[in-house]
Image: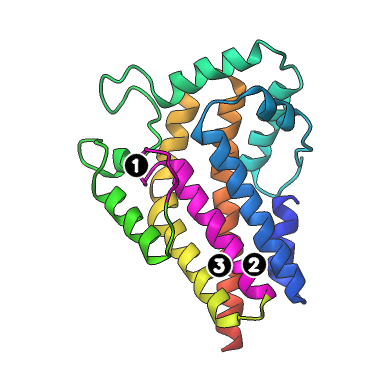
Amino acid sequence: MSTEEIIEISENAPEEMDLVELMSARAQGYGMLARLLRVEIDAPTLKELQGMRFPTATGNAKADEGYRQMFEYLRRAWDDSITELAIDFVRTFIGHGVNGYSAAYPFESVYTSERRLLMQEARAEVLAAFRENNLKKDRWTEGEDHIALELEFMQRLSLRTAEAIAAENDDEAIELVRRQYAFLQDHLLNWVPMFVSDMRMFAKTVFYKGVAQMLMGFLEEDEAVLTALLESVTEDE
């Protein structure tokens, strides 16, 4: 489902099933982005990506450019591309480790703390959000404010919202949408634009440059989706 279709559902949404599909589609998008930004691309993931159909006109120029760049890379990718992407992953997200300006470090704290340090206030705030929503990270040892975990947080709340809608628990669904909107505003949109800018600067492959654009475009469109949903709730009250 393209971003344009997601927005159309959110604006019209005449039936509960449409909203369930919307939330499921959002969860799928957040999950894919989390996977791409969490660890290097392995052979099964590369094959899966090559078999995907990428939208060509989502309604968001950044998302469109990101999908185009990823498609261009994937259609020419071969076995050695796994190594090339692994090298670029390290170059883009880990860098030289000299200071906070050597890579697109995937942690909110780096972009919101004065000295670009890890494990700062943003990490504590995200951890509190996880706990308030009875969510725990898995055995992965990175800080809670890692981009992949923040995206997974949105993914899991989207799935919970789909379940609440399917169960006709409207109050819970509305509250979950409000929590997602708040997290998107207070956290992801507060630092991801800077992170994306660094990704585009440090990445050498068009693939990760495309992931950066797709990430930014997806978040912008999701903000529009959540805003439309909350405005429709306000009108009904």
Label of residue 227 in the image: 3
Quadrant placement of the C terminus: bottom right
Magenta highlight range:
137-166
Establish if 94 lies above or below 27.
above
Q: Who's the residue at 37% across and 31% down the image?
A: 105
Rendered location of residue 46, percent (x, y):
68, 26
- The stretch drawn in magenta includes residue 154: yes
- Structural crowding at the residue carrying mark 2, measured as other residues with C-alpha within 10 Å and reported as few (<14), some (14–19) or many (≥20): many
Label of residue 143 in the image: 1
Q: Earlier in the sequence, mark 1 or mark 2?
A: 1
Q: Nearer the viewer, residue 69 or 80?
A: 80
Q: Earlier in the sequence, mark 3 or mark 1?
A: 1
What kind of secondary structure does the magenta stretch mostly adopt?
helix
Q: Residue furthest front?
A: 139
Say whether marks 3 and 2 touch (CB < 8 Å).
no
How far apart are the alpha carbons under marks 1 and 2? 27 Å
Q: Earlier in the sequence, mark 3 or mark 2?
A: 2
Location of mark 2 (residue): 162
